[in-house]
Amino acid sequence: MLLGMIAARAAMRAPEQNEIQRLSEKDSERAAAIALGRAAERTHGLPLFSGTIRFSTMSVPEMPEFLPERPLLAIVEDRSGRIGFVALCPNLLASMIEMQALGRVTSRPAQIRRPTRTDAVISAEFVNALLEELGRELSGQSETANYADFRYVAYLDDPRPLSLMLEDGNMIRLSYGFRIGSGGQRDGQILIGLPSDMVQPQPSPRQKLTQLSPPEPEPVAPPPTKTLAEAVHKTPIALCGVLYRRSMTLKAIRALQPGSLLPMPNDIIDQVRVETASGQLLARGRLGEKNGYRAIKLQPIDSASPEGPAFAQPAESTVPDTAQNPDPPPPLGDLNQPDPFRQSSTEDDLAQPATRSAGT
């Protein structure tokens, strides 16, 4: 008998819980409709009449089933880098353009075309306003995401790359069906998809105590040590490819004009030099082409050439040993000979001082 009374009590409470849930959904739909109308009126002065509004969830593979035909996909992102989207139908885009160009919505059908960058610029303000209004109207409802945290960052004209950009898992889906214009001339659709884990669960008492306790300091890893060889190997060095060098007189250089021809040997393609910025020869090569770029195929340097091998070091030191073979002192000039650096360097000039002294 007791079990029967408990079952009857539960049956009486079930309709009450269903009614409360239905009223909560109606409040959310009403708030979403107010946010849509306010955002359209504030950004473009566009009158919208809300129809069907649905809150649900969807997976990333299911997303193409809910998208409008040829939508403009506005990519939105929050501060933590999570990505969502707002899909706008072509009728809504055409109505926004007509409101800016004509000031009213016409009754002619919108042209189905690929969205452009201009469409994205026109609709970016509306997308941000809609997310802001949804965040304000739906604040405090734990079953919805915080729409106000997202902002427009980019757009897509093709829905195929969107599946690769979104994170795996379920998404919160908000779909709009509405009429556009003062007379309801066109039907419009909007689909909003945001990550479903935006609402963080409340921490348990044990987690609260863990959060209040000071965190343990993380071990600091010692900075990586680099040897001198590693630092030298990573040092950039500029290389120069020299095709040909020739000496010219200053007169010939001044005579050069646009269109002048400089004769060169026939084998310069096989004699390309690879040098450092200071002129040190590193290698020789042949001038060619690789993957659309000019390239030099390196060749070994002949050790018998005047340059010799690159970075060649002498086998024995050529510095003389001054301790064993001291250099002789430089010869002194003959004082009896005339000084060639003086103007009066003749024998008569050298004899004048003696004559004067004898006359005195």
Image (cartoon, grey):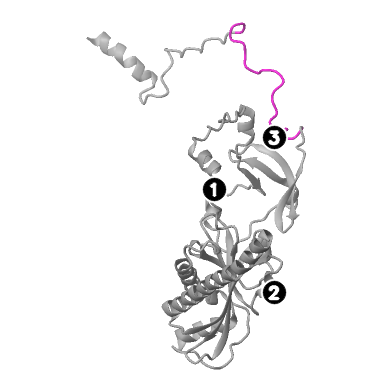
Q: Amino acid at mark 2?
A: Glu
Residue range in magenta is 304-325
The reply to whether callout 2 and callout 3 are in contact (CB within 8 Å) is no
Mark found first going from the N terminus, 2 or 1: 2
Q: Which residue is mark 2?
A: 65
**Which residue is drawn at the image coordinates 50% and 12% (left, top)?**
331
Q: Residue 21: x and y, percent? A: 56, 69
Q: Residue 106: x and y, percent? A: 51, 92
**Which residue is drawn at the image coordinates 56% and 93% (left, top)?**
108
Q: Which quarter of the rendered picture does the N terminus lie within? A: bottom right
Residue 307 is tagged as 3
Residue 299 in view, yes or no = yes
Residue 237 part of the magenta-drawn span: no
Q: Nearer the viewer, residue 142 or 11?
A: 11
Give the distance between the C-alpha atoms of the residues marked 2 and 1, in whole angstroms: 36 Å
Mark 2 residue element: helix
Q: Nearer the viewer, residue 76 or 255?
A: 76
Q: Residue 110: x and y, percent? A: 58, 88
Residue 30 is tagged as none
Q: Residue furthest front?
A: 1
Q: Residue 302: x and y, percent? A: 77, 36
Mark found first going from the N terminus, 2 or 3: 2
- Closer to the camera: disc 2 or disc 3? 2
Give the distance between the C-alpha atoms of the residues marked 1 and 3, in whole angstroms: 77 Å
Q: Which residue is mark 1?
A: 203
218 above or below 36? Answer: above
Q: Amino acid at mark 1?
A: Pro
